[in-house]
Amino acid sequence: MIQPSRRPPDRETDRNETQGESDCDAPAAWTEAHHLKPWSEGGRTNLANMVLLCPSDHRRIHDPNYTHERLPDGRIRFTRGAQTG
Ligand SMILES: [Zn+2]
């Protein structure tokens, strides 16, 4: 069941101008910032190192069953089961 406050946004009300989001249509307010290179490993908090992910994509980017790569347009492509070792 879809609750009113979680209703998917209309396309024309999507004012998301941020870069680094994944394919999904979640508006920026729903996204979570993820450091491509962990802050604890010297990753910078800037656009080059940050990506905005919806909660489900953010879970997936930390899921060892998936690998991910950043596409030239800033989106993240997930690949399932490609990680070796
Ligand atoms: Zn993260």
Image (spheres, grey):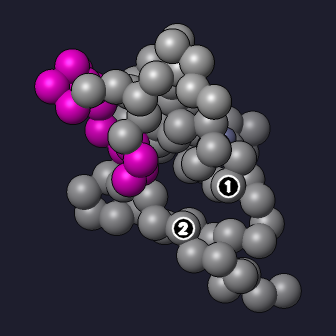
Going 37% across and 40% down the picture, which residue do you hit? 25
Q: Is residue 83 shown above or below 19?
A: below
**Mark carried by residue 8:** none
Q: CA distance from mark 2 to mark 1?
A: 8 Å
Q: Residue furthest top?
A: 5
Q: Residue furthest left?
A: 12
Q: Amino acid at mark 1?
A: Arg
The residue under label 2 is 78
Pinpoint residue 39: horizontal percent, then vertical percent. 67, 36
Judge left or right: residue 10 versus residue 83: left
Q: Secondary structure at mark 1?
A: helix
View extreme (front): residue: 1
Q: Is residue 72 visible?
A: yes
Residue 50 in view here: no
Q: Is the residue marked by circle 2 packed among few (<14), some (14-19), or many (20+) residues within 10 Å?
A: some
Q: Callout 2, which amino acid?
A: Phe
Magenta region, residue range: 11-24
**Classed neighbour count for the residue bearing mark 1: other residues with Cα under 10 Å, few (<14), some (14–19), many (≥20):** some
Q: Disc number at residue 60?
A: 1
Mark with earlier residue (2, 1): 1
Q: Is residue 76 left or right of residue 19?
A: right
